Image (cartoon, helix red, strand yellow):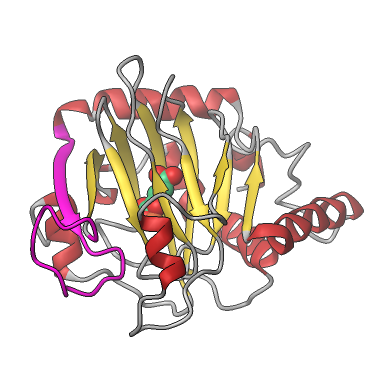
Amino acid sequence: MKGDLSQIINLERYPVTNLASKASERMLTGCHNQIEENGLCLLPNFVTDKFLNEVIDEVKTLANQTYRAEHWRSPFGRDTLKSKINPLKTRASMDSISYDLLGAESKMRQLYESEYFTEFLRKVLKTELLFKCIDPMISCIIAICREGDELGWHYDPNDGVVTLLLQKSLDGGNFEFAPNIRNSEKEVTEEELSVIRNEGENTISISQSAGTLSVFNGFKALHRVTPVGPKQERVVVILSYANTPDYIFSDKIRQSFFGRSN
Ligand SMILES: O=C(O)CCC(=O)C(=O)O
Ligand SMILES: [Fe+2]
């Protein structure tokens, strides 16, 4: 298994298979410092070039099985406002490949299903309570944002989303977030509203390259991917985790992303 991971993860820089080593300790301290600062940890060149090329090939092979979704949703997960033009609804539009389409040989599946990798994420997030989701469709998806596509401001329904950028868009498609802004399930604050209106003072825009792994708490942070420009699509793998070992997404989420619930 370790041997397999050396083909996938850049183990020299990120010694994920030897978490007790001094090198790992240093690496994890770096991760903790980043999370301390703004709730997000960026790990550039996390995967090997070989892996990146193989997964891009997987995406090409599955190109005719992507599902195009466009929907408007309340960033707060509350269906208070029905109108499509209401600025409090944000737009998500992209083509996605569901987890159940990744074959047994899929390199991406191997990374997501690696126990070393999950354990590494637990150490990054300083929790024992982090488990892969067991959703057959949503646990690990590949999202392709083409010209005009975006993932508008939202919170995630689960604690941990980890992304791996496979291909950067040449313009737009930036990841932006407002850390730790969620403070109540019920009441929407002025601070949250100002983020959605793109007037938020605490919004952070980050730069990711192909091969960057990003770990963040999207349950607590409002976040978005800005509209993608014309030159090159943005391709990202979205890996989902929860604090219980049995998390599956709602039928509504499966329907809205893939037009089917099983
Ligand atoms: O594509 C990204 O970088 C973020 C994905 C995301 O926010 C989500 O899937 O909930
Ligand atoms: Fe999200």
Where is 168 relative to 6, above or below? above
Left or right: where does residue 161 sit relative to residue 205? left
How many numbered marks have been drawn onto this rendered protein structure? 0
Counting from the top left corner in percent of width and height, residue 34 is at 72, 54
Task: Please identify the quarter of the rendering in which residue 125 is found.
Answer: bottom right
Counting from the top left corner in percent of width and height, residue 65 is at 15, 34
Please tell me which residue lies in front, 226 or 212: 226
Counting from the top left corner in percent of width and height, residue 235 is at 38, 32
Q: Residue at x 14, y 67 (%)?
A: 252
Task: Please identify the quarter of the rendering in which residue 39 is found.
Answer: bottom right
Please tell me which residue lies in front, 108 or 2: 108
**Residue 155 visible in the current orientation:** no
Residue 78 on the magenta span: yes
Where is 33 relative to 131, above or below? above
Q: Which residues are magenta?
A: 65-88
Quadrant where the C terminus is found in the figure: bottom left
What secondary structure is the magenta-colored segment mainly? loop
Left or right: where does residue 54 sit relative to residue 48? left
Q: Residue at x 54, y 72 (%)?
A: 130
Left or right: where does residue 215 sit relative to residue 82? right
Q: Residue at x 85, y 57 (%)?
A: 25
Judged from the image, the quadrant occupied by ligand 2 is: bottom left
Please tell me which residue lies in front, 75 or 111: 75
Left or right: where does residue 244 sit relative to residue 40? left
Residue 99 on the magenta span: no
Please tell me which residue lies in front, 136 or 186: 186
Where is 104 relative to 235, above or below? below
Counting from the top left corner in percent of width and height, residue 60 is at 29, 23
**Residue 211 visible in the current orientation:** yes
